[in-house]
Amino acid sequence: MNLINAAVRGLVSSVTAAVALSLAAVGAQARSFEDIKKDGKIIVATEGQFAPFNYFQGAKLSGFEVEVAEAMVAKMGLKIEWKALSFDALLAGLRQDRWDMVIASHGITEERAKAVTFTDPHYCSGGVIISKSDAIKTAADLNGKTVAVQTGTTYLDNVKKLAGVKEMKNFPQDTDARAALITGRVDAWVTDRFVAKTSLAASPSAGMKMGDFLFVERIASAVSKGNTSLAGEVNKALAAILADGSYAAISKKWFDEDIRCK
Ligand code: ARG
């Protein structure tokens, strides 16, 4: 009798442990807009190494996307808590509900949309080819060449599609991919057009030249897959700042032009 009891108890506790484990693996439920509203504070994650979109000016997180997010969150009547993490941790953290939203220049792709819910895009851009040679400007010019890209990006995906590329070197940060070009370890660097523009202007003596677009993309924030209440409120806030001139002012400040999707 005692033996059976012990066995049953053992079974019950191991089932309980298994359930607890699988719950931990799944993570807490994503916070709906209602939950966030009650708390008053939304947790937003970005990278902070992708100037002029999200980067550190000293200790201060700044950039176009930081200001766009702050303007949207103000429209939503919330406070913002920023988290800065490596690029490859950002979307994964949404699945684990470690933060409510990510804004880090993610292009909307089918692959990513399987794992997260994208909001409407907050800008349109694309990947460009940068090199120090006048002979490397187009996708065809990358034939037989070595190309630097940031790991986990659409730049990597799109360079991969080019059959003739000799070697692709990937780096955890886009700034390291740029450094590889500047120091001559690669023939070309593929990054965002506006990142390239800013980099070229910031280091004129590096000899970098902007080539063609390799592809274009729509850039959006992301929330946990299926968190439509939050995505809906973000979309409303984005529409509001696009309409009331605040987006235009932020874009003018950073780019001297309006980079919204047209
Ligand atoms: N737009 C590219 C992509 O969707 C690059 C994003 C890189 N963002 C960053 N914060 N480093 O993958």
Image (spheres, rainbow, N blue to C red):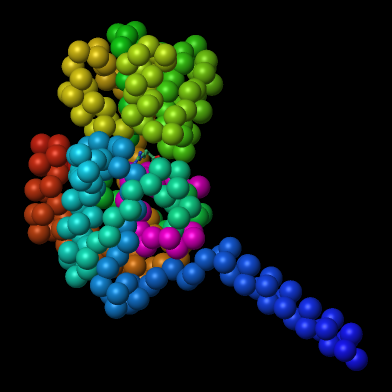
Is residue 260 visible in the rendered image? The answer is no
- Where's residue 171, x and y in %? 44, 29
Give residue 195's quadrant in the image. Answer: top left
- Where's residue 172, x and y in %? 43, 34
Q: Quadrant of the N terminus?
A: bottom right
107 within the magenta span: yes
* Nearest the eye: 181 or 244: 181
Is residue 161 visible in the rendered image? The answer is yes
114 over 133 or under it: above or below: below
Q: In what quadrant does ligand 1 lie?
A: top left
Q: Which range of residues does the magenta coloring cover?
A: 95-111
Q: Residue at x 20, y 39 (%)?
A: 58
Give residue 204's quadrant in the image. Answer: top left
72 over 34 or under it: above or below: above
Name of the residue lying farthest toward the front: 2
Q: Residue at x 50, y 47 (%)?
A: 111
215 over 140 or under it: above or below: below
- Where's residue 245, x and y in %? 9, 54
Name of the residue lying farthest toward the bottom: 1
* Nearest the eye: 240 or 59: 59
91 over 160 or under it: above or below: below
Q: Residue at x 48, y 23 (%)?
A: 169
Q: Residue at x 38, y 47 (%)?
A: 85
Is 207 on the left-hand or right-hand side of 243? right
- Where's residue 233, x and y in %? 28, 68
237 within the magenta span: no
